[in-house]
Amino acid sequence: MAGKTLYDKIWDAHVVDETSDGSTLIFIDLHLTHEVTSPQAFEGLRVAGRKVRRPDLTLAVADHSIPTTDRHAPVEDEQAALQLDTLAKNVEEFGIEYYDGLDIRQGIVHVVGPDQGLTQPGMTIVCGDSHTATHGAFGALAHGIGTSEVEHVLATQTLIQKKSKNMKVDVSGALGPGITGKDVALAVIGKIGTAGGTGYVIEYTGDAIRSLSMEGRMSLCNMTIEAGARAGLIAPDQTTFDYIQGKPQAPKGAAWEAAVAQWKMYETDEDAVFDKVVELDAAEITPLLTWGTSPEDVVSIDGEVPFPKDARDEHKAAAIERSLDYMGLESGTKMKDIKIDVAFIGSCTNSRIEDLRAAAYIAKGRQVADHVTALVVPGSGLVKEQAEAEGLDKIFTDAGFEWREAGCSMCLAMNPDKLLPGQRCASTSNRNFEGRQGKGGRTHLMSPSMAAAAAIAGHFIDFRDLQ
Amino acid sequence: MEKFTTLTGVAAPLPLVNVDTDMIVPGPFLKTIERTGLGKIIFYNMRFNEDGSEKPDFVLNQDAYRNAQLLITGDNFGCGSSREHAPWGLADFGIRCIIGPAFADIFFNNCFKNSILPIVLPQETVDQLAGDAEQGANATLTVDLEAQTITRPNGDVINFDVDEFRKYCLLNGLDDIGLTLQKDEKIAAYEKTRAAERSWLPTTS
């Protein structure tokens, strides 16, 4: 019998019940919730007279619609205020731990879990948010669910699942200086497409993956959903253990030793067989960014806007035409010649301390271009606190960046941080969909170094040319 | 949940690839705390001008498709965000069945929870059905979930696959939370073993 993959091992350890048609009841170790996808689920529980089975495995955080400006000021948007108020009432009624906007632990839910040491190898983690894939960086099986499934998990602490297929994405060799997990993510999506991972759980392997920090691994796993996969995984190693150790909810003392011993078993067996294998050469990965309205519209900073005639088929050619029109771009334009209006450094993809350090390294002693509005939104109150202790906030504000409170912010235009129609944004977020950052807004995805460099130059630029 | 057995209705063609859930329900509309009422804003930015007037070119603004109950879509429909607001909005508009060459995983799951049947068929077959849909209100499709068939306006019958458990839930309008709660003893047994074997696992409070 062939060995097991990391995914197989986590799956097997969480089976509560299996039926003959392959539907499996999986136990959920951690359920993260936020204000946007939970109100209808709590209402469902109330209507049916059900309780939350395991409030001790459930955490609520306000992140999506909460403003990133003064937290003591009232929330002006009435709907957002109602949504935040509803979450506060629900956590009270159902007895769930909640980090509100005034709590230093508050932040983007996928930054908060790792911050608190709640995200650990071998766990199953779900949240009503597709970027739950982030937690796969720790070797945890983590994925987004809809609100009906949020209700199911609240009521039963389980999910009904069908097992996905196994895909391995191997990135061999060494990444160039300053090439990040974000660039690897864009390289993977550019190669396999936004539906390339549909039906699979992806495990990332190879020297380049091992060399990534936890922040880089989180950026990569975060965007696995942009490749269509259910989840992304990276087997835990010393980098993982070092990151977790000392966090508030990390095991301590003898429990730590026992946990690490078991975590080390969460790796793919040598004789395991993957249903699909994709290989990339790290040395070929340059600073990448997107030109269009799908995360698969990836191009090197040295590249240019593509032509519809070069598309793989007529449907994609039509999509390119539509994207060119929406993005206000002409085929053949060099990426470095495209000017920006806004730079956004933040989101669950790139708002952790290492991301902010990389952006600050570029910003230090420089000035944001006159025509550019630039903002930095830390992923959590704790990340903000650490950045301020390191003086990063001062570097950013001296350079002309705004320094905000933690939240999802301009990633998805649910709070006041949004693009105006026609504005072009260098963004460290994860989706360049039409209207994602505001109706008519034009999003280009890239790493923090690249977004900071674009803010300074006023147009896209290879950040290495600024150094 | 409403049962899904058979459906005869007008199909609207929407042959774009990578239609994402931000397109279906843009972010600013996620601030609702209700499941209902989103039908009037689905595809908002594609469907309405700045001043709130309709864009006449958009398929659902055309008279033949105002009461469409099926959508014929392009590859990777429903990609992106997990927001169940997308299927809530589609269902609220009246869409009960979506046919395309492939769907994004989370959206696909979410549909079944809202009595919407997503059907995956080869691109050539989807193209044929899109051709039928182009004929407008005079050409209806009939979907029979029990028989797993789609009947075209010309009488041709197309078979489709559907997951057995999901079919059962749709046909009977079953709430799967109720089904899972019947397995309470198994969940409790799992919890007991879990606590004994992995006592270091974190809690939130």
Image: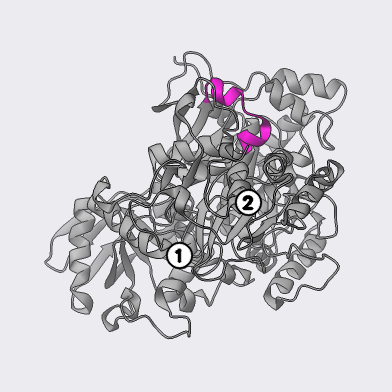
Residue A163 placement, left or right of A59: left
Q: Secondary structure at mark 2?
A: helix
Between B112 and A356, the one lying in front of the other is A356
Q: Main secondary structure of the magenta part?
A: helix
Mark drawn on residue B23: 1
Left or right: residue A96 compared with residue B10? right
Q: Chain of mark 1?
A: B
Q: Is residue A209 magenta?
A: yes
Q: Quadrant of the C terminus of chain A?
A: top right
Q: CA distance from mark 1 to mark 2?
A: 32 Å
The residue at the point 49 percent across, 26 percent down is: A282
Residue A308 visible within the image: yes
x, y (%) of residue A430? Answer: 55, 50
Q: Nearer the viewer, mark 1 or mark 2?
A: 2
Callout 2 amino acid: Ile
Q: Position of residue A352 (x, y in %)?
A: 71, 43
Of residues A26 and A352, the one nearer the viewer is A352
Residue B72 - label: none
Residue A17, image quadrant: top right
Judging by the rendered image, the residue that carries numbered circle 2 is A456
Which residue sits at x=68%, y=39%? A358
Local SS, label 1: helix
Label 2: few (<14), some (14–19) or many (≥20) C-alpha neighbours in 10 Å? many
Query: Which contiguous range is marked in magenta?
Result: A205-218
Q: Is residue B18 left or right of residue B178?
A: left
Residue A66 vertical position relative to residue B45 in the rendered view, above or below: above
Q: How many other residues sit within 10 Å of disc 1, few (<14), some (14-19) or many (≥20)?
A: many
